[in-house]
């Protein structure tokens, strides 16, 4: 078997996101995982829709007393 370079997998020249393309980007939100009973989740989702808010905004407002 010859000593040829394999081309499967690994780093390739020019592949991936350009360096510096994300410099200075700040993400204003943090991801949090919560678990609810299905019936509670459905009820909260309906209340959020009725109030015209996203589920996340609705839960945050309720927790913060807004």
Image (spheres, helix red, strand yellow):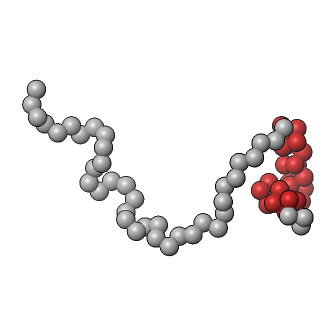
- Judge by depth and name the residue closer to the eye, 52 or 13: 13
Residue 52, quarter of the rendered image: bottom right
| Res. 58 visible in picture | no
Residue 63 in percent (x, y) is at 86, 59
Residue 34 in percent (x, y) is at 75, 46
Q: Residue furthest bottom?
A: 24
- Residue at x-position 66% and y-position 60%: 30
Lateral position of residue 6 relative to residue 1, left or right: right
- Residue at x-position 40% and y-position 59%: 17
Lateral position of residue 40 relative to residue 15, left or right: right
| Res. 46 visible in picture | yes
Q: Residue furthest top?
A: 1
- Residue at x-position 71% and y-position 48%: 33
Residue 25 in percent (x, y) is at 53, 70
Residue 8, quarter of the rendered image: top left
- Residue at x-position 29% and y-position 56%: 14
Q: Say above or below: 37 vs 27.
A: above
Q: Quadrant of the C terminus?
A: bottom right
Q: Quadrant of the N terminus?
A: top left
**Count of labels in the image:** 0
Residue 29 in percent (x, y) is at 66, 63
Residue 55, quarter of the rendered image: bottom right
């Amino acid at each position: 078997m010859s000593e040829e370079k394999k081309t499967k997998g690994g780093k390739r020249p020019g592949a991936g996101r350009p360096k510096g393309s994300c410099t200075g980007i700040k993400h204003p939100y943090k991801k949090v995982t919560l678990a609810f009973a299905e019936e509670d989740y459905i009820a909260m989702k309906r209340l959020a829709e009725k109030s015209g808010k996203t589920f996340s905004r609705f839960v945050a407002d309720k927790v913060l007393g807004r």
